[in-house]
Amino acid sequence: MNKLIPTTMIALGALVFSAPQALAQGTSTTVPGANGYDLSPDGGIVAGVDATGSFIWNPVTGFTYLQGGIGNVQKVSANGFVVAGQIDDVALGNKAAGYWSLTTDMWTSMGQHPSMNGGCPTFGTAYAISDDGGTLGGLLWDGCFTDAFMWNAATGYTLMTDANDSARLNDMSGDGTMGGGWIQTTSRVAAMWDTAGNLTQPLISPANPGGFGEIFGVDMDGSSFTGWQNGGAFLMRNGVFTDINAALGAPQSVGSSISNDGRVVGGWSGTGGPFGVQSGMVYTDWMGGFDATAFFAMFGVTPPVGQTSYSEVRAVSGDANSFLAIAGGFPFTESVLITLPDSFSSLGGGTVGVAGTPALDGYGWLNPGMTAGIELLDAAPASIAVLAFGGTYTPTPLFGGIVGPLPADGFLFFPTGAAGEVDFTFTWPLTMPSGLNLYTQYGVLDPSVAGGIALSNTLQLTGN
């Protein structure tokens, strides 16, 4: 990533480097009396357990109890359509991996793999689910050892390991193509699997020759993931390893969830356990690590009445604008759904080039003085991308698509590199009024397109 402030954008206002301002831009809603386990990828649904039983919940309609509250909830798909977990299987006479469907309000047991030798103590649990709810993953008990698995209704189980190791799949990519977790003979080793069950050990390095660790969160396509390595949280994004624990300066930490683009990680740091001191953690790959209480305070979000801090960030939505946080310390905790403003909106208008339609998106939040970024993907490689920006959106047919920022206030020129990408960060000016819109769009030199220019979508940036 090119961390720079494009000089032409300075003309929009004084880009002053300073601490982000605390503004009342976020919202928080406590999930009453509940232990929230997961947040749906779209950020609208919390799944968990309360005194009545297993549930899904949203701030508008409240609680929906899964088949009367039965089942053991672990993960939830987009829009709360499918919940992964564990259910009593009457035929097996034991608990087994299963899923609940909103359509039927029924739990369905996934049964047992025919090669397994009973359950010790159960037959298995589904700990992971794809965004669409069609693929699940977790572990099966084979005697008193475990096998990681992926499962779908059409093909059933695919085992991830052989008989010589125990293993568990903790999370999977949003598209259901990759799963992350651990394998273990004597110590836990971080593991990734594809849908065919092929294993990789991605944490093996000179600093960690055994690959020790565990994966807890996987992004949309499996190219980025988080977890712990030797007691500390990490981010592996597109093959680049970042030691989050070192950035936090914490005694120990865990990355437990990750956004779809692999840029934002949620988790906790501290000593942990029922008698330790634990703090929630948010890490972004462009701003670094934050104590969760301080991070959310930048958006005017504070812990619920009676609580002083957030002790864990348990889940992050795909767009990183919603978080499931745990407030307070053991055992007096509360689950809180936190939503931050969405600063970026795609207005369309792109055209197909040699690598597809160039895709322009933003990341971060446009608070005065806060760093954010924009990224262009799928542009023609080894070419030039011209970024037009301005305060006026006048959609006009040009170059076979729609040009949005007309008239443009300025232009920036970037090489697209071998990957056909451009990525840079900038600081949102302290002088920008709340609600101000800026419009940006790339034109990419592309000889495969009539007229020689492929357009990205127009991206609207809205200040908070």
Image (cartoon, rainbow, N blue to C red):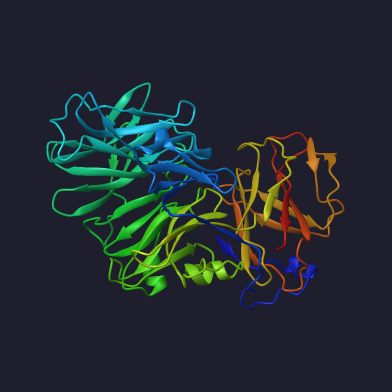
Instruction: Examine the rendering and report whether any part of residue 324 can be seen.
Output: yes
The quadrant of the rendering that contains the N terminus is bottom right
The residue lying at 32 percent from left, 59 percent from top is 228
- Image height of 65 relative to 408, above or below: above
- x%, y% of residue 62? 54, 45
The residue lying at 62 percent from left, 63 percent from top is 372
Please tell me how many numbered marks the rendered image carries: 0
- x%, y% of residue 85? 34, 39
Position of 114 with respect to 65 (left or right) is left
- x%, y% of residue 392? 85, 54
Q: Nearer the viewer, residue 324 or 329?
A: 329
Q: Nearer the viewer, residue 290 or 39?
A: 39
The residue lying at 26 percent from left, 27 percent from top is 111
Which picture quadrant has residue 334?
bottom left
Which picture quadrant has residue 28?
bottom right
Instruction: Examine the rendering and report whether any part of residue 176 can be seen.
Output: no
Position of 33 with respect to 383 (left or right) is left
- Image height of 355 relative to 317, above or below: above
Q: Nearer the viewer, residue 98 or 388?
A: 98
